[in-house]
Image (tube, rainbow, N blue to C red):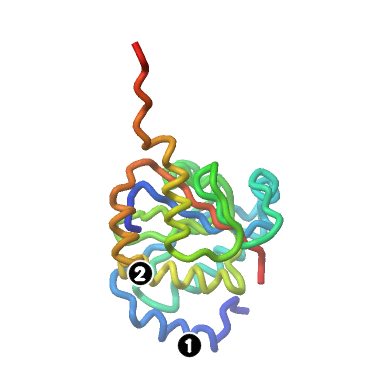
Amino acid sequence: MESDAITADGVEVTGYPDLARRYRVSSVPKTVVGETHEFVGAAPEGMVLKHLQEAVQPAEAPKPEVEP
Amino acid sequence: MALISDEVVTQLKQEFAALKEPVRLAVFSQALADPESEQVKRLVEELGQVDPKIAVEAYNFVLDKEKAESMGIKRIPAIAILGQEKDYGIRMYGLPSGYEFGTLVQAIVDVSSGDSGLSPETRAALKEMKTPVHFQVFSTPT
């Protein structure tokens, strides 16, 4: 709600075995952030934010300067 | 028989009394391909009867394909929790029963208020984010 860049799905996973396999959901609640980060169980707000920032870091980090 | 009991309806009326702005619930189902998805449609329609601020839009996943695509719905049953004008990108897949029913109710309250309830620090950090990120929280029925 605080950022138009962020979307969120709640998935009752028993109805979607393909997603359970794809994201290797073996215990719940499991949260997948982007396609690269994940955590299991409840997490405090700051921890969720950290996962989020790590998930976007490759895209938002400045590109390394290429030596001529 | 109603999916939401009279007792729960009474509780919901109290909870929804605090709703600020109207909320739209777009539900996608398809009776032929997924009979269980009709349960979700019924649940959402019953929710819509609890409070006049909750409007229900029921779509057929096959017949309303363009609508589904425009909302990024790729599977059913699906519920999009939308503000009157604004789509915050909040979706729920599957039948929201048990604990997840509470999650749906909370999502309705949050979207209605337009307030995430997050700390000022988190809000500030989120405002800086420009790269699209998609969260998926997986649960099982409780």
Residue marked by disc 2: B117
Which is more toward the observer, A47 or B116? A47
Query: As displayed, is residue B13 above or below residue A62?
Result: below
Residue marked by disc 1: B10
Which numbered tag is attached to residue B60? none
Q: Position of residue B70 (x, y in %)?
A: 42, 43
- Label 1 sits on what residue type? Thr
Task: Determine the secondary structure under disc 1.
Answer: helix
Q: Position of residue A37 (x, y in %)?
A: 54, 47
Q: Quadrant of the C terminus of chain B?
A: bottom right
Q: Quadrant of the N terminus of chain B?
A: bottom right
- Give the label, 1 or 2, closer to the camera: 2
Q: Residue at x 29, y 52 (%)?
A: B127
Q: Is residue B110 left or right of residue B61?
A: left
Query: As displayed, is residue B141 above or below residue A30?
Result: below
Mark 1 to mark 2: distance in Å? 25 Å
Q: Position of residue B86 (x, y in %)?
A: 31, 56
Which is more toward the observer, A31 or B27? A31
**Quarter of the image where one finds residue B111:** bottom left
Which is more toward the observer, A23 or B109? A23
Query: As displayed, is residue B107 above or below residue B127?
Result: below
Q: Is residue A45 left or right of residue A13?
A: left
Chain letter of the residue carrying label 2? B
Residue lying at the far front in this picture: please name it.
A67
Q: Are marks 1 and 2 in contact (CB under 8 Å)?
A: no
- Label 2 sits on what residue type? Gly
Which is more toward the observer, A46 or B63? A46
